[in-house]
Image: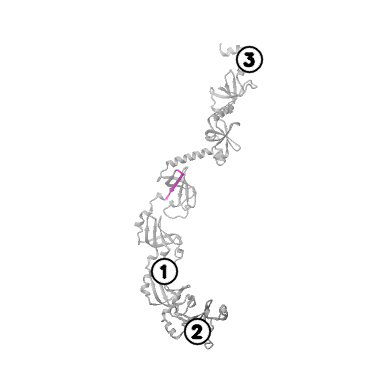
Amino acid sequence: MSEAEKKESLSKEELAEIYATTIKALEEGSIVKGKIVDVRNNDVIVDIGYKAEGFLSRAEFVDPAGIKIGAEIDVYIDAIENEQGMVVLSKLKADRALGWERIVENYKEGDLIEGRVVRKVKGGFMVDIGVEAFLPASLSGAKGPTVMDRLVGQTLKFRIVKMNKPRRNVIVSRKDVVLLEKEEAKKKMLESMKEGEIRPGIVKNITDYGAFIDLGGVDGLLHITDMTWGRISHPSEMLALGDKIEVVILNVDKENNKVSLGLKQKTENPWKEVERKFPVGSRVKGKIVNIVPYGAFVELEKGVEGLIHISEFSWTKKIHDPHELVAIGDMVEVIVLGVDVENKKISLSIKQLEQDPWTKVVNDFPVGTRVKGKIKHITDYGAFVELEEGIEGMIHISDISWTRRLKNPAEVLKKGEKVEAVVLSLDQENRRVNLGIKQLIPDPWPQLMEKFKIGSVMEGKITRITNFGVFVELSPELEGLVHISEIDPTLANKLEEVYKIGDKIKVKIIKIEQEKRQVGLSTRLTSEEA
């Protein structure tokens, strides 16, 4: 007799007894093993033993299409009997209960775990890691709605941020894992890099001092000085964001995760051939590329520049700013004065293209020569006279008059007027010519001393009033000083009130100093002298 026939032959009492025994063996809320025996529409029939069958929803399976009859699964006893007399089962609750036990036994906060992003919820995502865990949007590592939507359905690694055992909930982070993966990838990439190799990259950021290049997970700095052998003012002159370029690895600092890159190193250093191409003394042409207060830089060829110092522009003109003579972009011819390959410096000159006019000064203006020139400017200590273009001589204030004591050359000389003078001395090394006006005539002092004696009383004209006395002209060639001590004390504090320039005044010569060429006068006269 078959099993089915035996069952049919059992009495109702026997069946009731078997059912009661089976039900008593099952407990609601327990987890048991079951075998899938049938699939009916949206229900899955599971044999849980004890001569009992139950059902659960197909929706509880991650892959409903992959349900196989005969497969063994864990199920949760949700209810002993429903209206149809079937045991109500739940695979989802069983998975969650078993999953939580597995999580608690094998993982702790900070550990990495694999999970599948199930769905998007308010504030983040739900992730199946054996139990449902919450992934906050701020920890998803995704930026923008489109990128976030792509996370759903992906199986990824996460870091357990928080586990609340009483409430059985878990918070995970994808952002931490992404950062960790980037660091690991960066470390591997740094390990693989070798100095001198060429790698492709994309310009990620541009600053005043260089550009950051994305080498594919590792950023390297391309400094402005390593972009070109030539001169640029800003990296943007050569690069733009998003540019694809190839760079040379100059240095890898694995400890600080820094990579130094070069672009100019892809080509040969032009300074290797500088001494051969631009020997000292050679005449070359170049373009003015930069002007600074102390000179101008000339590009002789791509990557090679020389400096014209401000002192090398002109033999004769005093240049205060190179802009007076050149502008950026000008083509100029220069003489190479010096080459320093080690320090990448070339000294250039414009004035050396012509003969130094000062070499002719000794022949053209020997000492004792009478010269004529125009007064270019006047200072407190003298007047500068242009002898010829670029050649100036100076008349010191002490060489203007034999007898007059001048406070400023402007008292007798005017800018722009022509004067005659005598060459007193030459200093070719320091490019100086000393001139004198008083030397045009013989020194009148010896004759004046015969004419003007100590004790003589005469009338003179007031030429200057100071706080220490009054200057009086005794003759066109001679001037004396009435010191304040030789003036009536009652008048000493009001000289400018009592005396006026041009007034006639009687004075007595009381002192003559021949070496200093000074004459002392007094207004204190006897009744007979007055």
The span picked out in magenta is: 254-263
Pair 2/1: label in front:
2
Q: Amino acid at mark 2?
A: Lys
Indicate the secondary structure of the residue bearing disc 2.
Answer: strand
Local packing at callout 3 (Cα closer than 10 Å; few below 14, some 14-19, many 20+) is few
Q: 12 above or below 495?
A: above
Q: Residue at x 44, y 52 (%)?
A: 225
Residue 210: mark in rendering: none
User: Is 342 or 480 nearer to us in this picture?
Assistant: 480
Local packing at callout 1 (Cα closer than 10 Å; few below 14, some 14-19, many 20+) is some
Indicate the secondary structure of the residue bearing disc 3.
Answer: helix
Q: Residue at x 45, y 50 (%)?
A: 223
> Nearer the N terminus, badge 1 or badge 3?
3
Q: Report x, y in % for residue 216.
A: 46, 43
Q: Report x, y in % for residue 95.
A: 57, 27
Residue 16: mark in rendering: 3
User: Is 283 or 346 nearer to us in this picture?
Assistant: 346
Specify the quadrant that holds the N terminus.
Answer: top right
Q: Amino acid at mark 1?
A: Thr
User: Do the residues bearing badges 1 and 3 touch, measured as CB atoms within 8 Å?
Assistant: no
Q: Report x, y in % for residue 327.
A: 45, 62
What residue is shown with label 2?
Answer: 508
Residue 186 seen in the figure: yes
Residue 316: mark in rendering: 1
Instruction: Give the image's coloring scheme.
Output: one colour
Q: Residue at x 39, y 50 (%)?
A: 267
Q: Residue at x 59, y 13 (%)?
A: 7
Q: Residue furthest bottom?
A: 528
Q: From mark 1 to mark 3, how far is it between C-alphas?
A: 130 Å
Q: 74 above or below 312?
A: above
